[in-house]
Image (spheres, rainbow, N blue to C red):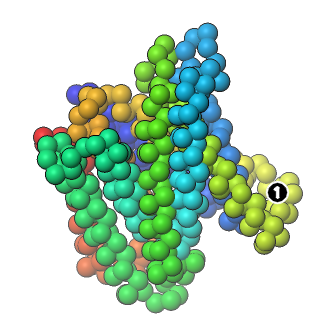
């Protein structure tokens, strides 16, 4: 029952994350770099800070929590800088492939590397016992991602240039796939950052929120990377004027804040959901892959709602559904052992 409750909490956070790119479509007259930076302030600074404060024991401070192991805090932030590259290119993958296909490829790659790397670093044997179950589970998830990617390639073959532009304004399959794969590999560093930040899980605070200080350090590192790139793009494209459009503040800040809150919900729910898993269990080790698989599933649901699969043949839609079915099975697989 506890495992089911943990999965449900993670699923709610995942659904929110997959919905986070919908409010961005409501941002008006801002360049990509401007709205990405502003929503990042909320997603990677404001809400992670509020979440981390929930883990602070009574009579203590967040600074004291982070200073319990400065080395762990800096390592988490360092992985965050690398993850920031993934987060940056993740946004570009949406731009070139759309919500459905972009998130599918990036999150699938992230699921594999982010789940297996911590196990390998911990000395887990991936060809026996729990390690083998973990490897098989990741393989099933990646198979589902591959099928969805194939559906995306079928869609691209069957669409005219006009249909591609109507569904995704800057659709570019080859460039998008390269960017999405890079995003996935670098995004896996987020889970490595959480593992490095385990010493920041201090006693005395709520067990439900104990991972959130490490989450803050990872997102802080990621913000540095993204902010540097976005400001450079502002200078290069002469788009600093976006921030001076005062009449747009109410609308754009509202939707950027909403996007940031929805995005952060995945790790807020992930941290809480993990506390319901038995420590050292296969499900606990597979938790990262579960989150990514859910993100892919819900992102494709949004892709269908937003009509990004318009013009696709029945065969293409059938392949997509098959891929989603494999992903759903991957969520159940660890619980069979």
Residue at 41% from the left image edge and 73% from the top image edge: 309
Q: Can the viewer see residue 65?
A: yes
Where residue 187 sits: x, y (%)? 48, 55
In the displayed structure image, the side of residue 304 where residue 146 appears, left or right: left
In the displayed structure image, the side of residue 94 where residue 191 appears, left or right: left
Residue for badge 1: 243
186 or 68: which is nearer to us?
A: 68
In the displayed structure image, the side of residue 220 where residue 13 appears, left or right: left
Q: Count every numbered label the image shows and give the total.
A: 1
Q: Is residue 150 above or below residue 229?
A: below
Give the residue at the far bottom of this rendering: 160
Disc 1 secondary structure class: helix
Q: Is residue 238 above or below residue 314?
A: above
Q: Using the rendered view, name the quadrant where residue 113 is placed.
A: bottom left
Where residue 75 sits: x, y (%)? 54, 41
Where residue 107 sits: x, y (%)? 41, 58
273 or 77: which is nearer to us?
A: 77
Residue at 44% from the left image edge and 68% from the top image edge: 181
Specify the quadrant that holds the C terminus.
top left
Where residue 121 sits: x, y (%)? 35, 45
Q: Can the viewer see residue 321?
A: no
Residue at 51% from the left image edge and 27% from the top image edge: 200
At label 1, counting other C-alpha atoms closer than 10 Å, the crowd grade (few under 14, some 14-19, many 20 or more) is: few
Q: Is residue 64 above or below residue 279?
A: above
Residue at 19% from the left image edge and 54% from the top image edge: 136
Specify the quadrant that holds the N terminus.
top left
Q: Is residue 52 above or below residue 160?
A: above
314 or 189: which is nearer to us?
A: 189
Give the residue at the far top of this rendering: 59
């Amino acid at each position: 029952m506890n495992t089911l409750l943990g999965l449900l909490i993670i699923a709610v956070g995942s659904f929110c994350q997959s919905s986070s790119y919908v409010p961005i479509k409501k941002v008006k007259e801002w360049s990509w770099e401007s709205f990405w930076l502003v929503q990042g302030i909320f997603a990677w600074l404001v809400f992670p800070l509020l979440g981390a404060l929930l883990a602070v024991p009574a009579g203590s401070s967040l600074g004291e929590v982070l200073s319990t192991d400065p080395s762990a805090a800096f390592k988490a932030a360092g992985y965050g800088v690398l993850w920031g590259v993934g987060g940056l290119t993740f946004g570009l993958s949406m731009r070139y492939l759309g919500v459905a296909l972009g998130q599918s490829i990036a999150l699938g790659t992230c699921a594999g590397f982010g789940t297996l790397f911590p196990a390998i670093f911990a000395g887990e044997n991936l060809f026996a016992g729990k390690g083998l179950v973990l490897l098989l589970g990741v393989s099933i998830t990646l198979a589902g991602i591959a099928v969805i990617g194939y559906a995306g390639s079928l869609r691209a073959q069957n669409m005219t240039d006009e249909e591609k532009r109507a569904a995704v304004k800057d659709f570019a399959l080859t460039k998008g796939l390269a960017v999405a794969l890079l995003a996935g590999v670098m995004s896996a560093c987020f889970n490595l950052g959480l593992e490095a930040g385990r010493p920041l899980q201090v006693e005395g605070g709520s067990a439900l929120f104990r991972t959130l200080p490490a989450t803050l350090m990872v997102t802080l590192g990621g913000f540095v990377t993204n902010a540097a790139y976005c400001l450079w793009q502002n200078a290069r494209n002469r788009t600093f004027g976006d921030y001076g459009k005062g009449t747009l503040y109410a609308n754009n800040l509202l939707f950027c804040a909403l996007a940031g809150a929805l995005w952060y919900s995945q790790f807020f729910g992930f941290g809480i959901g993990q506390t319901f898993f038995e420590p050292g269990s296969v499900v606990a080790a597979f938790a990262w892959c579960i989150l990514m698989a859910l993100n892919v599933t819900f992102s494709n649901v949004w892709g269908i709602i937003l009509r990004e699969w318009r013009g696709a043949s029945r065969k293409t839609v059938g392949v997509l559904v098959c891929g989603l079915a494999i992903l759903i099975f991957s969520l159940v697989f660890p619980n069979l052992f």
